[in-house]
Image: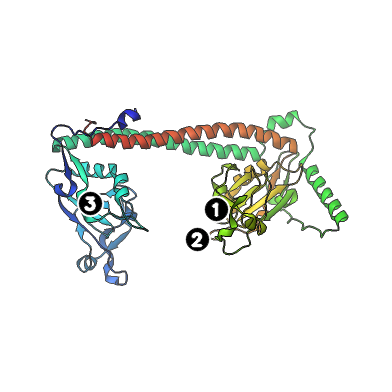
């Protein structure tokens, strides 16, 4: 269906004309920003619209208001109610209409229609041209179009009665499409909640209740921790190493009860937990990059969906010399920018001190179970981040996170069940995402067909 809609035709229907936008407008009104330093210009009763107010086509409220003095003494204008207002700098192709008179800033233009142009038709046509308007914009930091470019835009003009029928058809079809999109988004939200419920059930032992009943004689989690401590004590004695720091004691009375055979532990009890390393300054020194060693950053972890299978940057030998190469199987945990995002390396890689690495000791904890567990307590960890623009936590916060540790055999069973469920949900989510993308393309196709005269 989409392919059929995307078929183009350069021949306009009988009675249509291709005209310049400026020829079918009776006026184009610009705006401006009253001086912020003059108090009497601000906090008045006149809504003052900027691109920030264009999140929806019919905003219920405008963020800022100015006074009559702000209008009379500055480069802005009062725009009549229900006028089509479009962005000509920042947010190119956006349109808005408000049901009351309002002033606009310099990034917007109010389009006053002439007798041959319907306002709704104009609005939908601008929306259909968003990509084209963006493409002709110029500017280094922010793209914009000039007034003459706006006036010279070519609009296919149908007879006025047909414009209104086209608007009705657009709104009917896009209304149905929007309802379908809402259902898809609702399904995604429910799927997300289901995944969270699965993760929670996994780390609380509810996925393996029946399995535990059938396997009562497996080695307990407590024995795992005891064996690690014995091994560490032996290494310290034989190598004469300085004794490793003892993890903080957990307040067991404040923690929920666990299934039989489980115990509360911490990551330092179960393996190595340390920050990544990137000593050299400046960090953007070109000598650091372009070699054979994968270099992972917080954004890579965030979008990895639990497993780091690819990378976008590499370190050189010079970069490796001031960093550390962590082995495949390391769990990465972000502690800056994005707090407690997690993923497991599937290749050896370096990462900076904004990422913490966890390498489990042999036979302690399945690294993928550890990653899954941290996902379930992510919000709790985030609460320790200060309320600043650049959120971060320190290594000590992660050292003290209580980990519900199942017996090793049960960890394997938990991951088997959880992976089976999560694989299915990931496939369903991918299907929903594909349908949402299809809806976007179909929306564009409906608008394209409308202004080629093929919708009615």
Q: Does residue 93 show up?
A: no
- Quadrant (top left/top right/bottom left/bottom right) for the C terminus: top left
| Sooner in the amino-acid sequence: mark 3 or mark 1 | 3
Tell which of 15 and 47 is nearer to you: 15
Q: Which mark is residue 338?
A: 1
Q: Do the residues bearing badges 3 and 1 touch, measured as CB atoms within 8 Å?
A: no
Q: For the residue labelled by badge 1, is the local secondary structure a helix, a strand or a loop?
A: loop
Q: Residue at x 59, y 32 (%)?
A: 421
Res 454 → quadrant:
top left
Left or right: residue 13 versus residue 93 is left
Query: The N terminus is located in which quarter?
Result: top left
Label whose residue precedes the other's in the sequence (2 or 3): 3
| Tag 2 secondary structure | loop
Q: Position of residue 228 (x, y in %)?
A: 80, 47
Residue that numbered label 3 is attached to: 150
Residue 24 seen in the current view: yes
Q: CA distance from mark 2 to mark 3?
A: 38 Å
Residue located at (29% from left, 48% from top):
133
Tell me the distance, in whole angstroms, between the alpha carbons under discs 3 and 1: 41 Å
Look at the picture and state if 259 lies above or below 350.
above
**Residue 82 left/right relative to 379:** left
The furthest residue to the left:
115
Q: Residues within 10 Å of mark 2 (few under 14, many from 20)?
A: few
Residue that badge 2 annotates: 389
Pick the front one: 267 or 220 = 267
Asked if residue 28 is positioned above or below residue 157 in the image, the reply reads: below
Q: Which residue is at a point 32% across and 37% down the rendered structure image?
A: 444
Q: Earlier in the sequence, mark 1 or mark 2?
A: 1
User: Of discs 2 and 3, which sits in the foreground?
Assistant: 3
Q: Residue 305 appears at what percent x and percent y?
A: 56, 42
């Amino acid at each position: 269906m989409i392919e059929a809609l995307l078929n183009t035709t350069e021949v306009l229907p009988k009675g249509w004309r291709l005209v310049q936008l400026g020829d079918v407008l009776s006026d184009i009104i610009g705006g401006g920003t009253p001086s912020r330093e003059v108090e009497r210009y601000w906090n008045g009763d006149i809504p003052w619209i900027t691109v920030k107010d264009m999140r929806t086509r019919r905003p219920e409220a405008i963020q800022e208001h100015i006074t009559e003095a702000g209008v009379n003494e500055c480069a802005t204008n009062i725009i009549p109610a229900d006028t089509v207002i479009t962005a000509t700098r920042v947010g190119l192709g956006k349109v808005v209409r408000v049901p009351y008179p309002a002033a606009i800033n310099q990034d917007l233009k109010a389009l006053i229609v002439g007798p041959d142009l319907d306002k709704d038709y104009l609005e939908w046509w601008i929306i259909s041209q968003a990509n084209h308007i963006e493409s002709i914009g110029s500017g280094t930091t922010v793209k914009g179009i000039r007034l003459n470019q706006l006036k010279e835009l070519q609009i296919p003009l149908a007879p006025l009665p047909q414009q209104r029928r086209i608007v009705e058809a657009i709104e009917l079809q896009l209304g149905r499409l929007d309802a379908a999109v809402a259902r898809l988004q609702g399904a995604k939200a429910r799927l997300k909640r289901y995944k969270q419920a699965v993760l929670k059930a996994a780390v609380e032992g509810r996925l393996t209740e029946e399995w535990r009943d059938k396997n009562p004689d497996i080695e307990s989690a407590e024995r795992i921790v005891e064996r690690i401590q014995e091994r560490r004590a032996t290494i310290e004695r034989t190598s004469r190493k300085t004794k490793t720091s003892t993890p903080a004691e957990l307040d067991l009375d404040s923690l929920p009860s666990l299934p039989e055979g489980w115990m509360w532990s911490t990551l330092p009890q179960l393996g190595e937990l340390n920050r990544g390393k990137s000593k050299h300054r400046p960090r953007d020194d070109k000598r650091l990059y372009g070699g054979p060693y994968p270099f992972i950053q917080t954004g890579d972890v965030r979008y990895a969906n639990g497993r780091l299978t690819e990378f976008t940057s590499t370190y050189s030998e010079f970069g490796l010399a001031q960093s550390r190469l962590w082995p495949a199987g390391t769990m990465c945990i972000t502690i800056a920018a994005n707090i407690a995002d997690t993923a497991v390396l599937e290749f050896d890689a370096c990462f900076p001190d904004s990422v913490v690495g966890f390498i489990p000791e042999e036979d302690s904890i399945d690294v993928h179970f550890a990653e899954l567990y941290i996902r379930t307590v992510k919000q709790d960890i985030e609460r320790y981040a200060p309320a600043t623009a650049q959120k971060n936590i320190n290594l000590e916060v992660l050292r003290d996170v209580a980990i519900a540790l199942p017996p090793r055999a049960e960890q394997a069973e938990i991951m088997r069940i959880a992976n089976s469920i999560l694989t299915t949900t990931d496939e369903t989510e991918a299907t929903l995402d594909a349908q949402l993308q299809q809806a976007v393309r179909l929306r564009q196709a409906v608008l394209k067909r409308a202004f080629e005269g093929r919708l009615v």
